Amino acid sequence: MKKEVLIFGSNGALGKGVTQAFLNKDYDKIHLFGSSNDPSANYANIVYHKTSDLTIEKNVEIAFQSITPDVDKIYFLFSTIGGFYGGKKLWETDLAQWEKMMQMNLRSAFLIAKYFSN
């Protein structure tokens, strides 16, 4: 059975490191989802998928439409999407900053998991 991994957030520093780690694993295909599909290196088993803001459900739906389900494949999911806002004490943190982090981290994770499970 073929194995394919979907890596979301592949353009960030963490995503690039994760991609390098997966290149050394036994996957038939690696799907990279990121804001840019400009590869730094070409590999035969990598497919690039350019994505827009993945806190928007329609964009996540569109991203998953580029994958054709196949009963002869096992799909794995890895997401590095997220952000960190720190350096302030809790009582100094603005609600808008907290809500932005929830959108970026939790909402995108929920939507990606939702469409991956579908």
Image (cartoon, helix red, strand yellow):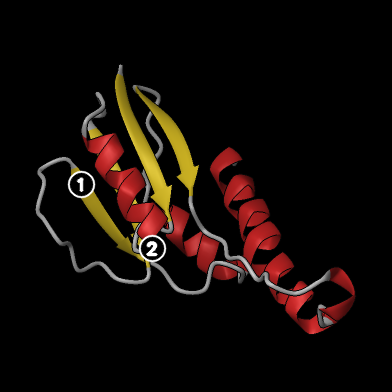
Q: Residue at x 67, y 52 (%)?
A: 110
Q: Position of residue 109 (x, y in %)?
A: 62, 53
Q: Is residue 58 left or right of residue 98?
A: left
Q: Mark 2 belongs to which amino acid?
A: Gly
* Quarter of the image where one finds residue 118: top right
Q: CA distance from mark 1 to mark 2?
A: 17 Å
Q: Residue at x 26, y 29 (%)?
A: 27
Q: Residue at x 61, y 71 (%)?
A: 56
Count of marks overlaid on the render: 2
Q: Nearer the viewer, mark 1 or mark 2?
A: 2
User: Which quadrant is the N terminus positioned in?
Assistant: top left
26 over 75 or under it: above or below: above
Q: On the image, numbered disc 2 is attached to which residue?
A: 12
Q: Position of residue 50 (x, y in %)?
A: 33, 67
Q: Residue at x 69, y 69 (%)?
A: 101
Q: Position of residue 59 (x, y in %)?
A: 52, 69
* Quarter of the image where one finds residue 34: bottom left
43 over 101 or under it: above or below: above
Given residues 1 and 93, the one toward you in this image is 93
- Tag 2 or tag 1, which sits nearer the N-term? 2
Q: Is residue 108 left or right of residue 17?
A: right
Q: On the image, numbered disc 1 is attached to which residue?
A: 46
**The residue positioned farthest toward the top in the image shown:** 1
Q: Secondary structure at mark 1?
A: strand
Q: Mark 1 belongs to which amino acid?
A: Ile
